[in-house]
Image (cartoon, helix red, strand yellow):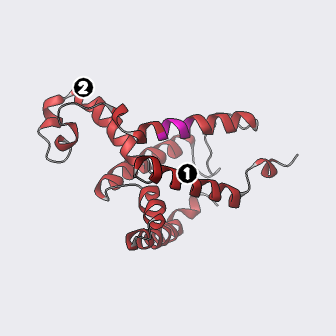
Amino acid sequence: MDKSKKYMNPYLAGFIIGLMMIAAYFFSGEGLGSSGAYRNITLWAANGIAHNAIANDDYFGKFIGSGVNPLNTWLVFEMLGLIAGALISAGFHNRLKFEIVKSPKITNKTRLIAALIGGVLWGVGTQLGRGCTSGLIMSGMAVNSLSGYIGLIAVFGGGYMFAYFVRKLWI
């Protein structure tokens, strides 16, 4: 069977994500997102290693308060569910494998370094922007917020502009 036929219909997947957004607002009063979970786990680890540095930081100090526990936010459980769901889906469709997906024009080392830099930039950007793209765009547009629509234009517009400069690494 053609592997492309094993993926879920994208319209059905979008519909299910929409239902999950409604459920998230109903049960938690918040939309979907991921950066808050990563921030809370990072703060928990950093607080255990260098409590004074974190407590005295103007930005991060306000998050630790009387103590940091990443399990105090539902976003951590959302992320754990996403990871578990991805592993289950990949295993169910015989797609569970560990590989470095890249262009033949770059080395594994270059790809891993680029992924690390991209991850760091994502982490910094989500904190400067007060959230990730799923929180901004999906949750923002779900409540008809102007910032959600502006975010959609900025993310896709910026992605297309940036792709012009890096596409030669992939083609």
Residue 20: image tag: 1
Give the x, y percent position of residue 167: 57, 63
Q: Which residues are magenta?
A: 78-83
Q: Nearer the viewer, residue 40 or 107?
A: 40
Q: Is residue 80 magenta?
A: yes
The amino acid on which the numbered mark 1 sits, given as a three-letter code, is Met
Give the x, y percent position of residue 13: 66, 55
Q: Is residue 86 positioned above or below 138 on the image?
A: above
What residue do we see at 70% from left, 57% from top? 12
Q: Nearer the viewer, residue 119 or 136?
A: 136
Whether residue 16 is visible, yes or no, is: yes
Q: Is residue 65 positioned above or below 151 on the image?
A: above
What residue do we see at 23% from left, 26% from top? 49
Prevailing SS of the magenta stretch: helix
Q: How many marks?
A: 2
**Residue tagged 2:** 48
Q: Is residue 40 magenta?
A: no
